[in-house]
Image (cartoon, grey):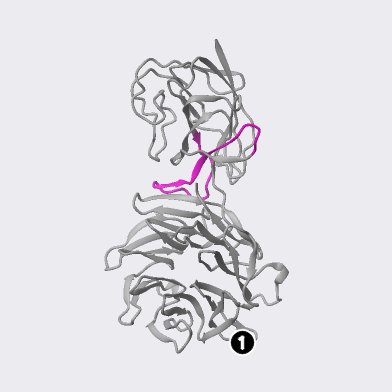
Amino acid sequence: MTRTLFVVLACAAAALSSASCGGTDKGNRATGGGDTGSGTTGGGGTDSGTTGSGDASGGDTGGGATSGTGAQPGAGEQFSVDAQGGTFTADDGFTIEVPPGAVNENTVITIQRIDEAPEGAVGPMYVLGPEGLTFERPITLTLPITVELRAELGESAVLGAYGFTAQEGSDDFAPLARHDVSRDSVVTETDRLSRIYPGMILATPMASLHRYPSALAADASFLYFASGGTEDVATGDNNDGFIYRVRLGTAEAEAMIPADPDPKALWVNDSHVYWASGGDDDPVIPSALRRVDKATLEVETLAQIGYVVSVIGDASALYFGDGDGENLFTMPLDGGEPAVLASGAGRPAYLAQDAENLYWTGGAATNKVYKVAKAGGEVTVIADNEAEPAGIAVDAEFVYWANAGDGGVFKAPIAGGQKTLIHRGDSMAGLALRGSTLFSTDTRGNRSVNAHDLESNRTVLLAFGQPVPWRVIAPEGQGVFWSNAGDYRYQGQVASYHAP
């Protein structure tokens, strides 16, 4: 007896960019037994022209001839497979690999096309039917990625794409467990037939319709951010802004302070949120370093000085940058007389720290990356002749920074030495480090949020087409958060990303 499987093969325009059903002219065939190499790809994907019927987990198929032949995709075409398995490859690279033992009788697969794909798709959607039909062993699917990006990815960069599928009769799509992604495809597995497409995890907005949100901070309960507020709280002074907090996992942002002149940097500890108040020219309000009590929402001004553009702290002290005077200062957590740690510091808008030292970038003012001991002393130039260095991060061995001018993300030894290119984007801005993963934002080109695996030297685009991704943080044990400035006033947002 022969079972007939109706497979609907859909080519859809990707929701985030244009896509096509083009591709190379690939064969549609099945081959006989032996080690086929159709198992786990280790993240590099598989050649969609490769045929075979090996175990989906790799290795020897256990011998035996494999049946299965069929025509190219199109309405009414057929692909035959039996208990020994087989492989079907479409013109666009979509491949079905049925391992031996997945079906126990002759099976005919018929193929048609549709023209829709869910939001987040980066390639065509395929509807495999009849929906709900299960296999004794998982089948392997190669899903082509056809999305067109504004900027070409580097050789070591891929999209953070997964194979998405839905239960029978449901439009609730979820990523499949296996996602061996390469530059042009995702290899995944399923044990049943359903709709499936290559897509990316969508970021979750935690706050929307804000005026140019920028600085971010987080504790165990809340995400904090600075913005110019929403249109319904506009004061009439375009320089005014607020410090907000939103409980993790929600989207209800609460303003913690009254309107304040251009808040632009944040740091939090257990009791307070500290921020850089940018000052105002009409009327003249000096720039300041301020804090708000998390429990009482009482606001204090700790220092008025220059043009404060950054703040960071530890258990005993605060450190902040003055963009006008090009100085880096320190002062006690509860206020006091600021002391200069470094002069001629450029525009120190981005800071990082370890137990002993502070690190910063001088921006276009100096095009240098610096280090100085928290206790004071000589300033060390880690890198010079950079192109508008911006975001910065540090671990036990290296300093990492992002260049807005040439799109480079680099690292250099803390102890001194040559710099190494990690990633080349268009105009890199924010950086955040968690473990061996460095996160970055690119404000132009693909407008992407990226995860750089420092051990494998591989970059995954977590999101692209973002409305000017700016700052990014990656708190330990949590997701990744970034601020999108927005292309227009009151179009900014704060986003949360959690991979499976």
> Going 62% across and 38% down the picture, which residue do you hit?
117
Q: In this view, does 91 lie to the left or right of 389?
A: right
Task: Categorize mark 1 by other alpha carbons within 10 Å: few (<14), some (14-19), many (20+).
Answer: few
Tag 1 residue: 284
Considering only vertical position in the picture, is 300 above or below 142?
below
Give x and y (percent) for residue 314.
42, 75
What residue is at 55 percent from the left and 12 percent from the top?
2
Q: Residue 214 in the image: state x and y as whole percent.
A: 55, 67
Q: Quadrant of residue 391?
A: bottom left
The x, y position of residue 323, in whole percent, is: 48, 79
Q: Quadrant of residue 313?
A: bottom left
Vertical placement of residue 97 versus 236, above or below: above
Secondary structure found at label 1: strand
Q: Which residue lies furthest to the bottom in this view?
A: 337
Foreground pick, 202 / 250:
250
Amino acid type at mark 1: Val
Give 312 or 23, whichever is nearer the viewer: 312
Find residue 213 and report its horizontal and vertical position in percent.
59, 66
* Between 410 and 295, the one nearer to me in the picture: 295
Which residue is the extreme one toward the right? 232
| Residue farthest toward the front in the current orientation of the protein | 295
Q: Quadrant of residue 393?
A: bottom left
What secondary structure is the magenta-colored segment mainly? loop
Task: Please state if 331 lies on the left or on the right of 467 as rendered.
Answer: left
Query: Which quarter of the rendering shows the N terminus?
Result: top right
In percent of the image, x 41 and y 27: which residue is there?
50
Tell me, yes or no, whether the highlighted magenta stretch contains residue 155.
Answer: yes
Q: Give the range drawn in magenta.
A: 143-171
